[in-house]
Amino acid sequence: MASGSTIVDAVNDCINAFDDHPKLVALALENPLLFESKDLNNENILMKACAEKKTKLVDTLLHSKYFSKKLLTDKNSSGHNALMISCMVNDSECIDLIMNSQFFDPSILKETDVNGKDSLMLACGSGSNATMKLVNSDKFDKSVTNNKSKYKKNALVYAIRSKQFDEKTFSEFIKIFNNQAIKNVDAADRTPIIYASFYRPEYVKFFLMIDSNHEQRITKFCSKKNKHIDKLKSFFVDANNTGFSYLHILAIFHPHILTDIIKLVDKHNLFICDNIGRKFYEYLPNKYKRYLNDIDNSLKLIIINSIPNCDICFENEVDRSLPCGHVLCAKCLNVLPSKNCHICRFQFVDYNVRKLFLS
């Protein structure tokens, strides 16, 4: 059966041959040494089968007389156990088999890898199928939703950043988190709604449906540049001490979302200023300012009156705020240099960034 001379080779042969020769592999699995073997990465046969999404082989292993709980609790050199690996490859079937095994202990859900990530965080990072299979299991422990990784991020943040959840699935997923987890602040001083406003703006409404009062702002970024809005491509890596709320981020990068969520926002949050004294609506293109119809008349008047004149011609109404903070009308935008602001000569990252701001 085995092409190699070692037990590790035999394990690899079993995994590779199982689809074509399941009965032959079943006979080979009568050797208990295959269940005890580990490779140079400290991976056992169950981990390897999970990594290759060999669902039927995983089922065969779990029902073998040589199977033991140790195969579920063992970790490889990266700190991943078999369940974590299934979560990483977004294999809902293997997750279901493992969690329904007689050997499964819910404490396995609390185990973390070398980066402090547990099974739920890894599942969130890979896809919604694995995540929902995990959380809908009778053996799922909701207390893990309060866990934090090495960088103090929770599973909610990894779900947002993965961009693998549709709106319907995310609206169900967020319900398993308590208020503490929803407002968790990570090592970069960002809450989940801050991540949502940048990566998945369509998720913001689900946070506001749970609690309309989200005041947390970006206040602890380390910056190497003396600019108010940093380079777009590195906004969440090397951004400034901006004082932006999630509303500021939406106004700059996803203004079309605001018309849908503005009625869900706690009113006093509409007047939060950033570190140069600007409210979120001062960054809005004019057409979006006029579309905010779901708020009181006094605020409508303030927003309309906030439409300034162009920083270059001083005559026309402003159409767009640039990354450097200067505001230009449509006419002056059309003659904007390819890389620099007319006034401060702020250099954009590249053509794609300029195109986004002028779109």
Image: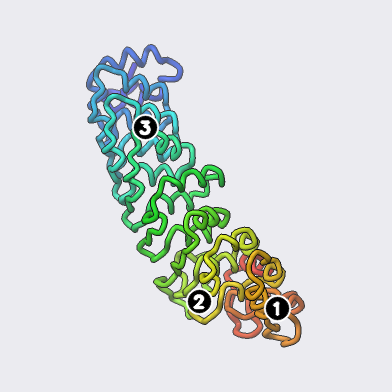
Q: Is residue 359 visible?
A: no
Q: Is residue 354 above or below residue 7?
A: below
Label located before the other in sequence (1 or 3): 3
Mark 1 → mark 2, Cα distance in angstroms: 20 Å
Q: Secondary structure at mark 2?
A: loop
Q: Secondary structure at mark 3?
A: loop
Residue 246 in picture, x, y percent from top left: 51, 65
The image quarter containing residue 252 is: bottom right
- Under mark 3, the amino acid is Asp
Residue 61 in picture, x, y percent from top left: 32, 22
Which residue corresponds to mark 2? 274
Dot label at residue 6: none
Q: Is residue 91 above or below residue 240?
A: above
The image quarter containing residue 349 is: bottom right
Which residue corresponds to mark 3? 138
Viewer-proximal residue among 153 and 342: 153
Q: Is residue 237 visible?
A: yes
105 sits to left or right of 341 = left
Screen quadrant of the N terminus: top left
Which residue corresponds to mark 1? 318
Label located before the other in sequence (1 or 2): 2
Residue 182 in picture, x, y percent from top left: 41, 55
Q: Residues within 10 Å of mark 2 (few under 14, many from 20)?
A: some
Residue 48 in picture, x, y percent from top left: 35, 31
